[in-house]
Amino acid sequence: MLKSKTFVKKTRSGGVLKIVREHYLRDDIWCGSEVCKECKDEAPVLQEDACIESNLCSYPHYLIPDTNVVLHQIDILEDPLIRNIIILQTVLQEVRHRSATVYKRIKDAIHDKEKHFYTFTNEHHRETFIEREQGESANDRNDRAIRVAAKWYADHLAKATDNGPLKVVLLTNDRANKEKAEHHGLIVYRCEEYIKSLIGNPELVDRLALTPDDQNEITGSKLLFPEHLPLSRIQTGIKNGMFLQGTFHANRDNYLEGTVFIHREGAVTNEVLLQGFQNLNRAVHQDVVAVELFPKERWVAPSSVVLQDDNPDDEDAEEDETETENKLKSVASESSALKPTGRVVGIIKRNWRPFCGMLSQSQIKEATRHLFTPADRRIPRIRIETRQAATLVGQRIMVAIDGWPKNSRYPNGHFVKNLGTAGDKETETEVLLLEHDVPHQPFSQAVLSFLPKMPWSISEEELKVRADLRHLFVCSVDPPGCTDIDDALHCRELENGNLEVGVHIADVSHFIRPGNALDQEAASRGTTVYLCGKRIDMVPELLSSNLCSLRSNVERLAFSCIWEMNNNAEIIKTHFTKSIINSKASLTYAEAQMRIDDTTMNDDITKSLRGLNKLAKILKGRRIDKGALTLSSPEVRFHIDSETHDPIDLQTKELMETNSMVEEFMLLANISVAQKIYDEFSECALLRKHPSPPPSNYDILIKAAKSRDLEIHTDSAKALADSLNNAAIERFPYFNTLLRILATRCMMQAVYFCSGMDNDFHHYGLASPIYTHFTSPIRRYSDIIVHRLLAVAMNADSTYPDLMDKHKQSALCSNLNYRHKMAQYAQRASVAFHTQLFFKNRGIINEEGFILFVRKNAIIILIPKFGLEGTVFFENKDKPSPHLTFDTEGPTLKVEEHTFHMFDKVKVTISLDASNIQHQRIRMALIEPVIPGVSVPVPESEPEAKKPKLDR
Amino acid sequence: MAGLELLSDQGYRLDGRKAPELRKLQARMSVFAQADGSAYLEQGNTKALAVVYGPHETRGSRSKSLHDRAVINCQYSMATFSTAERKRRPHGDRKSSEMSLHLKQTFEAAVLTELYPRSQIDIYVKILQADGGNYSACVNAATLALVDAGIPMRDYVCACTAGFVEDTALADLCHAEESGGGTSLALALLPRSGNIALLQMDARLHQDHLNALMEAAMTACKGLSKVLDGVVRQHLEEVSVLTSE
């Protein structure tokens, strides 16, 4: 059974190494087909009647795609219609080598039982292994290996079925390969040929990716972009310092500008500015690119112009381009603002994913080529070919990019999926979930199978091992309408005069055991995502809203953190235990506040709340003394109509004493737990840190304060907190909040990390040397891990391998960080969408606001009442623009006679601009101060009259 | 993409073996006439040569000799040409002295030393080509050499490595698998009694996995013992045919 075959490989790692590896050939690798009696496969994958209606192949057949087909046409292969495919090991290895994302997708397809994909290990099969011949390139050998394997299958199946109808079909787009295969008597088709021959599935054709041959037909002959350098030259260039490697980030507001963040540490610059179409050279947001720096005299400052690519058609676009580019360059830039500037010389790795967006139909009615406008403004428009344009107009669709030839203004792509009508609440929610990569499919059966069986009750064993805290007056305080209650509190006086304070957290790790499908799903989701009127749960609802939720008057399992404190809120003893609690009340913040304030109430719960509140104030004071920051961001709440689910009212979130009371104890619990798990597991504790921002981040804040003759010190968190506290202007109470909003934008992101992989633990914002998340295991996976660590530390649970592996832990952290960031973005996008819905129903509104930022051709305004930010442009396409003078030092913008400073109070009208269905946006126009030709007259006080026009 | 896929979804390893399968083992005994016993062994691409002298009177200082049993002296070395990169390997470097010590401990447990008080048995092993599992190849070769020298032992000593990749225990690792990260455990077993002569692992492994890994290594050792037994029997047949004439 074992046939040994030794072969020699050369690899390059510094020098030339001769690597000798054994290669065993086997005769126990089965063909995987149901028809075959000869192979002793226990669970054959490929079906006997592998029928799909096709003009070309009227017989049942299995498909064998070659590497390039898998790489480029993965969208087709993923279609549920395409089944019974043989993936050769050679192909799989090549795919793994060339593209990690496609490899992941093809592996998912292989694991999908419905798809009947079979992996044939041809490289180790005695009859299909071939050796590389003299002078044969690796690619040629692999092509030959694929042909040999296909031939073997053809013969094998013919033998097994006595020349029955079952055949194999090789799919390849390589002409030479096809000819050679035909020569050997194989059935070969090009992928396009085959897909187009399928009867009754025209939509598949749209999902075909365009191959280089086809692209030539589409585009004109004019060369628009410089050629990308080959990878080998890029690599030598990077090695000798000529080029820099980095990730390209397109500018959201200006499609002709982007930044490359350089990966290498210790590089001279870590950001390179790119300006202009030619210099961007077909880089798409998130691509890894190589850039060449310009000499210093060609450096420019980032333009603060807001530019959007909205040319109606592509063919005559080039003239416009040069015009706008010139505008960019005529920047009156001082040397201080100049940034390292460069151009893209080559793409190291594309990071394309399917993009959501809408079709802009071509003017020519019968045309099959259309432009697709992605929802993300940083992604360029994509040209696709489709025959169903008429049905796709007005729909949200998904499109994947295939390539970007140098003679085409837009990248070429193909249609992937239709999501639904644009503007629909469901469709739009789907879009924003997809765009932010939030996993939101319903939980699979495998996941649900790990849920506890209902009716559920606390078992005898649990009663024995857990501390029984059911007699305590525990209560929970949460926002109204909260169903996933993960924390509850209590406070009571002890006999020695000290206070006992307990924070009780839902014991989610009791229900989610490590390693099972439920755990894996939760780990991959990472967090619950809260959208307006919708919640995407991290764990199934049975757990999140019932068994784990610490509702009142039911017995629940909890993880308790209990301190003994003196009246000065100094901790005397800390104790962690798994427990059983019975919450006596679930209150909202307002209810809790009322109980505290109402002097007539003196029941146990109220007393406990008062005790907590008193301690919380002391704790908060101490924390602020240490330099914790109080920051601010405008947050709003929608009142949602219970039937139509449309927002009917909007109010900014109010903060009460009780909010800060709960927060204070959560912080305390988190810090205590962080210390405990770090003491116990110094290598693999999951912690959270908040790095201090680089000083340059504060520039805008300092400038802004200076414009009002105030000074902000940013040397330490403490100094910043103090100067923020002192910064106030009489008769301008909102000023301080505005400053805090600005300060928030200067901050870095807080991140999870594994203690064994880092040595900076400091949490800047909270001014704590160590921090973690422990208190919300229902909605955050990080907390589940922390629970498990803590449980092991106190011998309440056993450890498992992945928990102790710092590399796996670290990989988990990066996923959690990513999910958290994306969840935040999705949340913001959802608020923005609901704001639009709100204003759509309201017509035009006049409101007061403050200038938050000043840009070169626009000002950004914050409306405190709605927590809404909007831009007022001073340049219009159809109108002559007013005279603008921009001063970066202030920063100020002089429009005609009036100068705008930061924080100036202005009056604007707000309306919904629905001219572009995809990017419906809130439009603001200036009313006050009155500038002739710029500001608009105050609209009639009858907004209702205008409503019909705004409604679509 | 970095890294090698050590175990494919179909359950095949880099070189086409399945998880519990051993590499091809070939061995010859009595390869040198001048030594008391010798053997040459190939375990896949790992090739080892073992030579045994003794038991004989203790050489050097007499103080080393033990009054109740024989002293076992082991020396391990690697040929300069044994790895992909040619490298001079001086005697007595840390790695080889550690290996020598391990071999000594292994054979002290297996050889019936108490039969030869005040004497010494020398075992010299050299790795001619290294491709993972050097220790186990040495032990297996030395066992054959000891058998060839006619030194009584409790049982064959069979050694094998096992590794742990993607929650599966792999038997008899090759060099790529050993260096591709993950844990590697070396185990020397007296297969008939099931006693462990030596167990060595110097990477981190969660306790839950240890039993599975040891189980895999022990099964592999038992498989090896059958092959070694076959080699010995065949050698005896050849020798007896020669001597009977």
Image: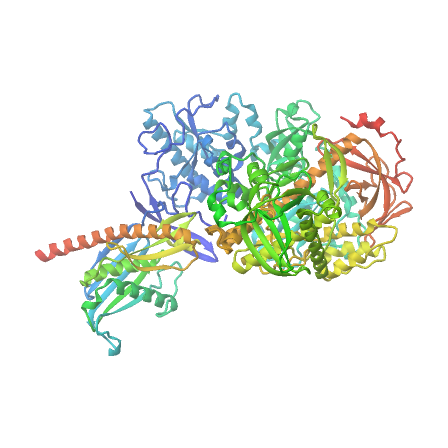
Q: Position of residue A355 (x, y in %)?
A: 62, 36
Q: Position of residue A634 (x, y in %)?
A: 75, 45
Front residue of A711/A200: it is: A711
- Residue A460, relative to residue B239: is it above or below? above
Front residue of A692/B239: it is: A692
Residue furthest left as drawn: B245
Front residue of A582/B197: it is: A582
**Left or right side of A862 for A587:** left
**Left or right side of B235 for A501:** right
- Residue A904, relative to residue A315: is it above or below? below
- Residue A386, relative to residue B132: is it above or below? above
- Check the picture and name the quadrant holding the C terminus of chain A: top right
Residue at 88 percent of width and 31 percent of height: A941
For residue A293, say whether it is visible: no
- Check the picture and name the quadrant holding the N terminus of chain A: top left
**Left or right side of A861 for A672:** left
Give the image quarter of residue A293.
bottom right
Q: Position of residue A290 (x, y in %)?
A: 62, 50
- State how many labels appear: 0
Give the image quarter of residue A132.
top left
For residue A79, say whether it is visible: yes
- Residue A916, relative to residue A670: is it above or below? above
Q: Position of residue A276 (x, y in %)?
A: 72, 45
Front residue of A19/A566: it is: A566
**Colouring scheme applied when the structure was drawn:** rainbow
